[in-house]
């Protein structure tokens, strides 16, 4: 079942809520609807929402000490 727009639906909110509940620092997704709320999730819930490839890039930069 494909969504008509990119707004997050209850399944998306359920996934993000679970990450919050288990105190996860990152939520990795390609979902444009969730990515659109990335700043809000970080400021209100402390969860960084990133695309998987962005997370890997960020992790490599941090592990190299740059």
Image (tube, rainbow, N blue to C red):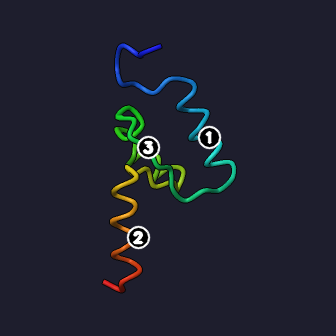
Element marked by disc 3: loop
Pick the quarter of the image with the C terminus.
Answer: bottom left
| Left or right of 27 in this view: 17 | right
CB of mark 2 within 8 Å of CB of mark 1? Answer: no
Mark linked to residue 61: none
Q: From the top left corner, tell me how far across and down residue 59 is, in percent.
A: 40, 70
Element marked by disc 2: helix
Q: Which quarter of the picture shows residue 36?
A: top left
CB of mark 2 within 8 Å of CB of mark 3? Answer: no
| Left or right of 1 in this view: 60 | left
**Marks 2 and 1, how far apart at CA:** 24 Å
**Marks 2 and 3, how far apart at CA:** 16 Å
Mark 3 / mark 1, whichever is N-terminal: 1
Label 1: few (<14), some (14–19) or many (≥20) C-alpha neighbours in 10 Å = some
- Reading the image, the residue beneath label 2 is 59
The residue depicted at 50 percent of the width and 50 percent of the height is 27
Q: From the top left corner, tell me how far across and down residue 33 is, in percent.
A: 38, 32
The residue depicted at 65 percent of the width and 56 percent of the height is 23
Of tags 3 and 1, the one toward the viewer is 3
The residue depicted at 35 percent of the width and 67 percent of the height is 58
Of tags 2 and 1, the one toward the viewer is 2
Label 2: few (<14), some (14–19) or many (≥20) C-alpha neighbours in 10 Å = few
Q: From the top left corner, tell me how far across and down residue 49 is, in percent.
A: 43, 50
Q: From the top left corner, tell me how far across and down residue 25 is, in percent.
A: 55, 59
Residue at the extreme bottom? 65
Q: Which quarter of the picture shows residue 32?
A: top left
Mark 2 / mark 1, whichever is N-terminal: 1
Residue at the extreme right? 22
Mark linked to residue 17: 1
- Reading the image, the residue beneath label 3 is 29
Element marked by disc 1: helix
């Amino acid at each position: 079942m494909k969504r008509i727009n990119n707004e997050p639906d209850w399944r998306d909110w359920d996934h993000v809520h679970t990450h919050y509940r288990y105190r996860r620092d990152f939520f990795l997704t390609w979902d444009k609807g969730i990515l659109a709320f990335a700043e809000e999730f970080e400021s209100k819930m402390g969860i960084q929402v990133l695309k998987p490839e962005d997370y890997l890039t960020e992790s490599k930069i941090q592990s190299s000490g740059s």
